[in-house]
Image (cartoon, grey):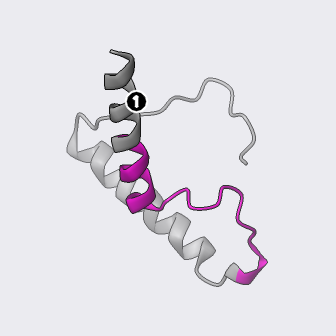
Amino acid sequence: MFPFVKDSHTVDVVQTPQQAFEAAAQFGRFTRVLSDMDIDTLNITLPAFHNLALRYSQFLEAIEKAMLKG
């Protein structure tokens, strides 16, 4: 979690090369700051959250159920 930053905003799509540069620079800074973090101290919050095979299976199941309700 991050503290709320008043009057902040998020750029979803860069409009200028400078914005792209800043995004890349900040991502680099973020990864550098976390580079020595012990990942064993982390806990799984949402099991299988990034499991794309599971997500795709759930997607197909949702389509099937929606077609049955049709």
**Camera sees residue 18:** yes
At x 32%, y 15%, the residue is 70
In depth, the one of 57 and 27 nearer the eye is: 57
Q: Is residue 37 left or right of residue 67?
A: right
Question: Which residue occupies the extreme front position in the image?
Answer: 68
Which portion, as a residue range, is magenta?
A: 40-59
Residue that mark 1 sits on: 65
Residue 63 location (% of width, % of height): 33, 33
Residue 25 lies, with reference to residue 1, above or below; the image says below
* Residue 68 on the magenta segment: no
Give, as a three-letter code, the residue at label 1: Lys
Residue 13, located in which quarter of the rendered image? Answer: top left
Task: Give coordinates of residue 4: x percent, y percent.
Answer: 72, 34
User: Quick check: 2 above or below 12?
Assistant: below
| For residue 10, side relative to residue 49 (left or right) | left
Viewer-proximal residue, 68 or 23? 68
- Give left or right: position of 47 versus 40: left
Q: Is residue 43 magenta?
A: yes
Image-based side of 18 in relation to 46, left or right? left
Q: Residue at x 49, y 60 (%)?
A: 50
